[in-house]
Amino acid sequence: MDVRLSPEQHALRDAAAHVVDRLGPGTVAGLDDMERSGRLADAVEVSGWLELRQRAEDDGPLTSVVEVAIVAEELGRGLADVPFVGPVMAADLRRRAGAGLADAPETVLLDRTLSWPARSLNGETPAGVSVDATEGRAALVLLGDETASRWRLGLVPLQAGESRLDLTRRSAVVKDGAVLAVLETPDVLGEDHLAAWMALGLALSCADLVGVMRGAFELARAYASTRRQYDAPIGSFQALQHLLVDAYVAMEGSRSIALHAAWAVDALAPPDALAATAAAKAYCARAALFVCETSVQVHGGIGNTWDCLAHVFLRRALLSIELFGGADTNVERVLAHHGIRTPVGSSHGLR
Amino acid sequence: MDFGDAPAEREFRLRLRAWVAEHNPGLPASSTDDGYWAGQAAWHQSLYDAGFFGMSWPVDVGGQEMPSVFDVIVDEELAAAGAPPRPSVGYLVQGFLEHGSDDVKRRFLPGIVNGRDRWCQGFSEPDAGSDLASLRTRADRDDEDYVVHGHKVWTSYSDDAEWCLLLARTHHDVAKHKGISAFALPMRQPGVRQRPLRMINGITKEFGEVFLDGARVPAANMIGGPGDGWALAMTVVSHEREPGELGYVGRYTKLVNELAARVRKEPDAFGSEQVQSLGWAMVEAEMLRLHVRRRLSDRLTGLSHGPEGSVDKLLMTEVEQVVGHAALAVGGTGVGSDDDTWLKVYLYSRAQSVMGGTSQIQRNLVARRILGLPVA
């Protein structure tokens, strides 16, 4: 056991950090700079990061999920307004089904809770939500046979999505019965494929959340060191120090469990990978909400204005929390893996 | 980047698993039942004699000089088998290793590591808790000995210990943290009187107080030089903060497994809030297991042991107290039954945010030394 990143993985992290630090929005006003966001999209396109889960010569993916998570984390930290998790998930699904490469940009369709993939049992498009729904993108959807245990792939065209919640990524709602094309693929997907693919979605949403926490935390730490009240930097007050430390500690626990989640997707049997990534998602979902809310609080009045980046982190976290299920849904998945069914009428809420 | 076992780790794990299946003494938990201590020494010695204790410590004090990942494997396998956790003496060992002379290390470390000698830690005093450097116990030179007067409290295992790692003031005209020296004090002597204290969950082995009235300790039993006691104390408490050093990951996993077994046995007896509470305990225990692995890997690079121990202590405290709440939720308070074990687990968990430095002290340390926040 040695869970340190390899030199190549460190280099990948540096490269991704360099791209988001140079081409990420940087400020709330920067979100409206179309020339910049276009250059960011181009940089991600040429980097090859969207292709990391495509098929290699040995039929496996080009890289492990650890590499993908490294990129996802940096993109989250820098509030990168560019599709990543959606297209990577689509490429991974195509590979598992033995399908060829997509002709046009793709993402995936989830059900309306965003906790599960959208699944069709009658050949029609199910209602759902698609993330990373930029102009001209289509979404992969699972088409089941009568046993609902073997799945083929379909393709739904998307309307360009909205970014009402997450100002950095677009989501589109798909109504049921929309146009659907069936993909001819050599393989059908079984329950294990689906579990491993869900685990990928959970691991990548954890990576994004860890990145978002790092960004939101650093924003707050820097502000607390410079903002002065009572003739002293507010970061010198013990009440604020303890709040920031609690956020930092939640982030450190998240990093450890999210790192394991990224490793687990490829290394563990699919049901174990799903349980490991669900545990990580439960932890990271709760932590991210706390860290981002703390960042808003530390910024005081400024933190409650549109022009402060703190809410952009919080909004991005809220979407990543929902992706493949939030804290409660994933605690239930962990319990299920231990043979424990959660009674109906569970208390809900993010914390 | 690999969380999995290397071949040598796998071989060790399987060998240990087979051994534990044969040798699990089935002791009750130390945190809830004084009966644990009747068998603790034998368990420590049995683990040691079989080659499963002190994995990462130097060979010449009885260790095996293997990577600390082997300690993690021991924790995991003991927990999975429902065996008692690894005895927590790592922080004593580290204090001696970093600050003791060769003579002191040779005389005291083998007995600590092999479990033949039992030790308590004489740090805190009635008026020196978080502000440890204000301690008033004094040691005055008298020929080849020091003579000690003072009062120590919250001293774990003082009733069983043959030895005490004692902090006492030897210099009175310097800054308060510069006048402290550390000693290996023999407990069985006329000048030492100890009294067990009862913890809030009723156990009496965890806490004690020690009255020192003319106790004698040879000058040759000083650890480090005169006035070096504070540095040793900081080493000991920083290791005392670390779940990897304490073997606590195994303790939490074992408790969670026992609670899960209860729910599986009688699924309809538990409501959603109880089950959710257990689910969070599972998530938290898993987080700590993986966090310890990440920290141990960082240390392979030679990253030294610094203030991040305070982060780990805060995480460990969070886990212990979430597990404590699950114990209360699933195990119950014992009202209406004759089993108050889980109540004791819960009550014991409240001490984690105090012992080894309160959570408030840890937060001060992290704010200053890791986050670099401005000083008031």
Image (spheres, rainbow, N blue to C red):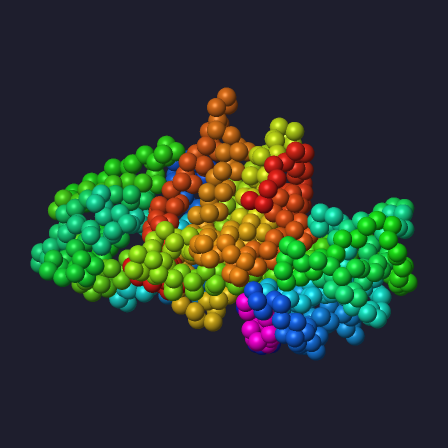
Give yes or no for residue A18 being in the magenta stretch. yes
Left or right of B39: which side holds A86?
right
At which x and y percent is residue A34? Answer: 66, 71
Q: Is residue B177 visible?
A: yes
Majority SS type along the magenta span: helix
Q: Is residue B167 above or below residue B203?
A: below
The residue depicted at 57 percent of the width and 53 percent of the height is: A284
Where the C terminus of chain B falls, by quadrant? bottom left
Residue A85, picture quadrant: bottom right
Say if A162 sits above or below A20 in the image.
above
**Residue at the image point whose x is 90% and y is 59% from the top:** A182
Q: Horizontal and vertical percent for residue B359? A: 37, 49
B329 displayed left or right of A38: left
Q: Residue at x 63, y 48 (%)?
A: A326
- Nearest the viewer among B204 and A66 is A66
Front residue of B220/B281: it is B281
Foreground pick, A302 / B334: A302
* Residue B110 visible, this angle: no
Residue A30 position in % (x across, y down) = 58, 69
Q: Is residue B37 magenta?
A: no
Q: Quadrant of the N terminus of chain B?
A: bottom right
On the rendered structure, is B13 left or right of B139? Answer: right
The answer to whether residue A293 is left or right of residue B186 is: right
Task: Name the residue located 81 percent from the left edge and 69 percent from the top edge.
Answer: A104
Q: Write down the region rendered in magenta.
A: A12-27
Count of numbered circles on the image: 0
Give x and y (percent) for residue A12.
61, 74
